Image (cartoon, rainbow, N blue to C red):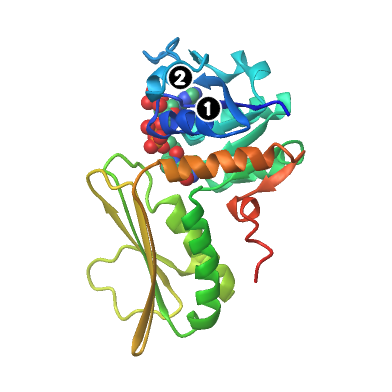
Amino acid sequence: MSEIRVAVAGAGGRMGRTLVQAVHETQGLCVGAATELAGSGLIGVDAGELAGIGQVGAPIRPDLDEVLADFDVLIDFTTPKATMHHLELCRDAGCRMVVGTTGLTPDQRETITEACIDIAMVVAPNMSIGVNLSLKLLELTAQIMGPEADIEIIEAHHRHKVDAPSGTALRMGEVIAEALGRDLAEVAVYGREGHTGPRDSQTIGFETIRAGDIVGEHSVWFVTEGERIEIAHKASNRMNFARGATRAALWISERERGLFDMQDVLGLRQRQ
Ligand code: NAP
């Protein structure tokens, strides 16, 4: 069977470099193309050299439209603006996508859903296998303890992260809210300050920490009278996200169209 050719968008970024290495190391995948923002000083540099693994034969290009014939699946961990541009190109060319970009607006998510009438995509704010297993545990905990519990989501990331709360924290909130039949938009409380009054038992709280080089930590507390459950996940390096993304690339290469997430990729959706 021939290898699936993967394009890595934002190949000069923190995740991009890790993704190039992960794709190169994954059996059945190869790096077919790599891109960076036009005007970047990295244009023309081999993506493998940049990732510290030696040449992989994919010089970094300034736009995806130049390399549409060179890949089967795009892995995109860039910015919402870049991802939406790539979506348009991939939809026209019939290429599959694995999107890890966070900070997508509801309108942008709607556009993605609509594009999946034509192409197959995996979109997940956190591709880590451990985090996705945690989502399943959160669903179960919310069903059993949630109605009586005060629920708080605490997340910490490195100082460069530009969106808050993290896409993962929001996804955790959505999973819990769904399990409890609540609407996250109505019950979410972001940070607290001043005279807040007593806690409304229906709310789901979010606390954000930004500091140093923390890769990504999430902890969800379910607190009732007399006991507390904490479901926590700590990422110690970026390779855990990249390995999830390569697993998603292999999985999506066998699908024609539709929008999926890591619960689908890991077969967790149908488990009760
Ligand atoms: P980063 O280091 O800033 O990387 C983003 C890269 O994309 C940069 O090199 C940037 O170039 C490049 N880029 C911007 N516009 C582009 C375009 N039009 N075409 C090609 N490349 C473009 O950030 P990061 O830490 O790697 O994170 C990237 C995204 O992934 C963020 O949204 C982050 O939250 C998300 N993320 C998701 C997961 C997950 O598991 N789903 C895990 C980690 C991170 P310039 O620097 O020149 O602007």
Q: Nearer the viewer, residue 246 or 115?
A: 246
Dot 1 surroundings within 10 Å: few (below 14), some, or many (20 or more)? many
Tell me the residue at 63%/50% (across/down).
265
**Label 1 residue SS:** strand
28 vs 180: above or below: above
148 vs 26: above or below: below
User: What is the number of the mark on residue 16?
Assistant: none
**Coordinates of residue 234 in the picture (x, y in percent):** 36, 56
The CB of the residue at mark 2 lies under 8 Å from ligand 1: no
Q: Nearer the viewer, residue 122 or 58?
A: 58
20 vs 103: above or below: above
**Coordinates of residue 52 in the picture (x, y in percent):** 37, 23
**Coordinates of residue 70 in the picture (x, y in percent):** 64, 18
| Residue 78 seen in this snapshot | no
Q: Nearer the viewer, residue 257 or 150?
A: 257
Tell me the residue at 59%/74% (across/down).
181
Mark whose residue sits in front, 2 or 1: 2
> Horizontally, is 109 left or right of 239 in the view?
right
Where does label 2 land, which residue? 47
Where does label 1 land, which residue? 8
Tell me the residue at 72%/25% (across/down).
92
| Residue 227 seen in this snapshot | yes
Splitting the image into 4 quarters, where does residue 6 fall? top right
Q: Cβ–Cβ below 8 Å for labels 2 and 1?
A: yes
> Horizontally, is 242 left or right of 109 in the view?
left
The amino acid on which the numbered mark 2 sits, given as a three-letter code, is: Ala
58 vs 215: above or below: above
